[in-house]
Image (cartoon, helix red, strand yellow):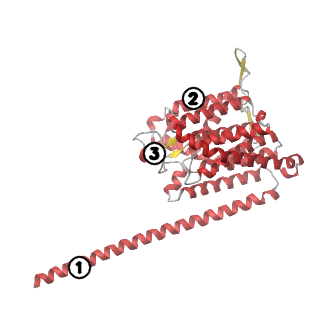
Amino acid sequence: MNILSNQYLIQNIALIGGIIFFAFIIAVFLTPIVGMIAKRVGAIDLPATLRKRGERGLDSRIHAYPYPKLGGLAVAGAFFLVLYATGSLISIPTGVTVGILIIIFLGVIDDIFEISAPVQFGLQFLAAFVIVASGISITSINVLNTPISFDWLPDIIFQIGNFTYNFVFPGDLLTIFWIVGLINVINWVGGVDALNATVSSIALGTMLILVLSLGNIPLALVIAAYLGSVLGVLPFNWHPGKIMYGSVGDYLNGYFLAIFAIIGGVKWNATLIVLALPILDGLYVLYSRWKTHPEMRKNPVKLMSLSGYNHLHHRILSAGYSKKMVVLIEGTIMFIICTFVLILSGINEEYLMIPVGLMILLLLFTIVTFRAKKAEKLNKLRREAQLLEEEITKNVVVNTVYKEEKEEKFIY
């Protein structure tokens, strides 16, 4: 599969790049406006020091100052404006559009009022159900060239007035849990400035290339518009951030990645590998919570809504690395994974020299930074040990002098 040998794709590469840039500029323009709105409506994320004991998210807050949220509104605004301006809005199925609006509503309400976990999950399941009710479902997947069907029963049709719903079992249930699961897994990545956007952007860029290689230009335009919108808010979220993407942005990232995976026509083994880092991290977090809180094992919603300090970015921070290093480390891992996905997907290796070269440079840079950080920590420990030794020596000398003076005075 060689995407650059397809003349139809070549003709649209400039259009794809233009849409990414157009969405980026609009998001950059909208973000400060959204930031002012967030401050007016009270969509502010308080640090742990200003939160009450037992308050939701207390254990996972690592920023030291009040932080405006709602950055995802700038993403959504830029996304819809670009699609409307380019006439690509019709490329989005109605069910997906309704689901997007539900996720935006949920995210905005949560950013302002921090609503309870059951309400959040209820609206997430509603957004996912709208998708399957509109006829978009995972009815089969192909893993390692092995087709697996999820349409086990004859068609079960529900008729409510003029609305007809064709229930597919277990495909529809699998689709709902895939969407809700990925929304929360991607949301958990957002514990450090710019991390969620970095991980999501790399995954979106990889999906964009894979969809382009399949010749699905309408969907590629939609992915490009969303990718550019996410990147437009990123400069304002880079540490030290001026605005968070918030629940609305993090939930939208997970929702879009889940939907693009379903309707993109990309092989599921490639999709699962692209999203392996956040998925595995999410599974580890759930296992840790299940092991640490046995009293909540019978309540999956409560178990998923617990906050804690056991995400991958928390563990990297605990190792002594900065927030920027966390983004670099996880971003490098994602970039390496996604580069190999493109190679394994059969895209001509000749055109992968640039991403492979960048991957190697990122890997080397990360290793060098790791070693520099380790050396800095060792030097710091040596300096502290030296200062401690000097302090002890000084105290010993002072005590000796005092003792000698006391004994001398006693003699006289």
Q: Is residue 111 above or below residue 94?
A: below
- The residue indicated by pointer 1 is 400
Vertical order, 197 against 354 (above or below): above
Based on the displayed image, in which of its 4 quarters is residue 222 positioned?
top right
Find residue 13 and report its horizontal and vertical position in percent.
Answer: 82, 49
The residue labelled by disc 2 is 122
Q: Is residue 242 left or right of residue 1?
A: left
Q: In the image, residue 381 lies at what x, y percent?
A: 44, 68
| Label annotation for residue 193 | none
Quick one: 132 or 114, which is closer to the camera?
114
Q: Residue at x 82, y 42 (%)?
A: 217
Three-letter code for the amino acid on which mark 2 is drawn: Gly
Q: Residue at x 31, y 73 (%)?
A: 392
The outermost residue toward the bottom is 412
For residue 273, side relative to residue 315 (left or right): right
Mark 1 Cα within 10 Å, few/some/many (few <14, many 20+)? few
Residue at image location 66% in from the left, 42% down from the top: 75
Judging by the rendered image, the residue that carries numbered circle 3 is 59
